[in-house]
Image: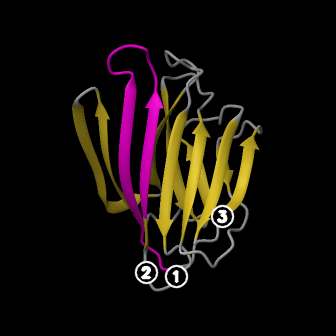
Amino acid sequence: MFLISEVLNHGGSAYTTPTIPQGYSGLLFRWVGDSAVAAGLDLVALRMNGDGADAKYRWQELSATIATPTAEENGAASDTYIDCGWVPGATAAHAAAVSVIDVIIPRYANTSYVKTVRIRNSLFVAASTGGMILYENSGTWIDTSAITTLSFLLGTGPIATPTWIGLYGIP
């Protein structure tokens, strides 16, 4: 069920959802957009319930460009976010291209479990070999609180206009 559909035109470097209704088995959040930063790529970070100070996030990332896979992990819970991958910036070879990020969060309302997410991010940055990038990430927010808001923050920002976001409740 569609919960939120919004086109972002504010030019800020972060987006926080309105309060998320409880009662679904999970959530699917979709981002279709990019960054207006004057750089090739910009990081997208995820926080739950505005929790950025407690450093209780862990994540792992697999990425591939051409046929070269790479992996990265932050297993020490020292980050203040979950890494969602990257979006193209204003000076990327194809600045008109957008990134698509899907975040699946099961049991978001359950207060007996820490929150684990799965993230898929794909982007096109150049019309040459290696111009497609795929990220498959997972992350954990080490907290049993029900998720009531999600915040997406760009590493440098601002969010390019227009960027579309959607939030779906999974029955």
| Real-space Cα separation, disc 1 to disc 2, in angstroms | 6 Å
Quarter of the image where one finds residue 11 = top right
Residue at image mark 3: 1
Magenta residue check for 102: no
Q: Main secondary structure of the magenta part?
A: strand
Q: From the viewer's perspective, is residue 155 above or below residue 20?
A: above
Q: Residue at x 28, y 52 (%)?
A: 73
Q: Position of residue 153 (x, y in %)?
A: 58, 47
Q: From the viewer's perspective, is residue 107 above or below residue 130?
A: below
Q: Do the residues labelled 1 and 2 touch (CB within 8 Å)?
A: yes
Neighbour tally class for label 2: few under 14, some 14-19, many 20 plus, Cα within 10 Å: some
Q: Position of residue 20 (x, y in %)?
A: 68, 68
Which part of the image, by quadrant, shows the C terminus? bottom right
Q: Residue at x 47, y 58 (%)?
A: 80
What amino acid type should be assigned to the residue bearing mark 2?
Answer: Tyr
Which part of the image, by quadrant, shows the N terminus? bottom right
Under circle 2, the secondary element is loop
| Real-space Cα separation, disc 2 to disc 3, in angstroms | 23 Å
Neighbour tally class for label 1: few under 14, some 14-19, many 20 plus, Cα within 10 Å: some
141 displayed left or right of 147: left
Residue at image mark 2: 113
Q: Which residue is drawn at 77% across and 37% down?
A: 9
93 displayed left or right of 75: right
| Real-space Cα separation, disc 3 to disc 1, in angstroms | 19 Å
Residue at image mark 1: 110
Viewer-nearest residue: 81 or 22: 22
Q: From the viewer's perspective, is residue 131 above or below residue 72?
A: above
Magenta residue check for 140: yes
Sequence-wise, the earlier of marks 2 and 3 is 3
